[in-house]
Image (cartoon, rainbow, N blue to C red):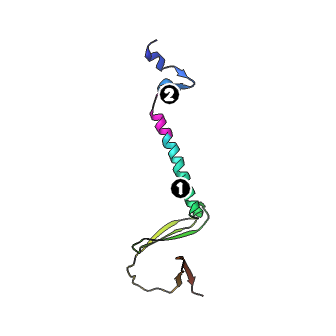
Amino acid sequence: MPRSRLSGRRRGGVGLKEADDPMLAVINLIDIFLVFIVAVLISLLSAMGLGDLLDGQSTVTVVTESPGGEMTIISKTPNSLEATRITRTEAEGRGVRLGVAYRLEDGSMVYLPDGE
C-alpha cells in the first residue's frame, strides 16, 4: 500500500500523524512543569507560614526590608492586595501619632497603638 493510504488510517483512536508528532510530547512536558511549579509555590508558601495568602477570607500583612534599608509592606485583605514601598527619605506634612513600633532582640517588630 502506498504511504498516503496508511497515514489516513487510525490505530487505537489516534491517527498515525498524531502518534508520530514529537511536539505532543513537548506540550505534555509543559503541562507537567506547570503543575510542578504550582505545587512548589504552594509548598513554599506553607513552609514560610504564609498559607493564609491563599485563603480568600484572611487578612495578611507582610513587611520586608532590603539591604539598602527600603521597606515594602504588602497588605492583603479579602477584597484587595496593596504593596507600599517606604524609603529613608523624610516625609513632610501634618499627621497624628498613631502608636509606637518596637524592634525586639530577635529582629521582629511590635506595634502598639496609642490608647483612645
Please state the total of marks drawn on the protein image.
2
Q: Quadrant of residue 84?
A: bottom left
Label 1, label 2: how far apart the Cα atoms are: 34 Å
Question: Residue 5, image x and y in percent?
Answer: 46, 16
Q: Quadrant of residue 48?
A: bottom right
Q: Where is mark 1, residue-wise?
A: 41
Q: Read off the magenta span.
A: 18-28
Question: Residue 62, image x and y in percent?
Answer: 52, 69
Point 53% across, 85% down: residue: 100
| Magenta-colored segment: predominant secondary structure | helix
Question: Residue 69, image x and y in percent?
Answer: 41, 75
Residue 24 lies in the magenta stretch: yes
Residue 77 lies in the magenta stretch: no
Q: Residues within 10 Å of mark 1 (few under 14, many from 20)?
A: few
Q: Amino acid at mark 2?
A: Ala
Q: Secondary structure at mark 1?
A: helix
In the rendered image, the vertical position of residue 79 relative to residue 21, given as above or below: below
In the rendered image, the vertical position of residue 71 relative to residue 96, given as above or below: above
Q: Foreground residue, 108 or 21?
A: 108
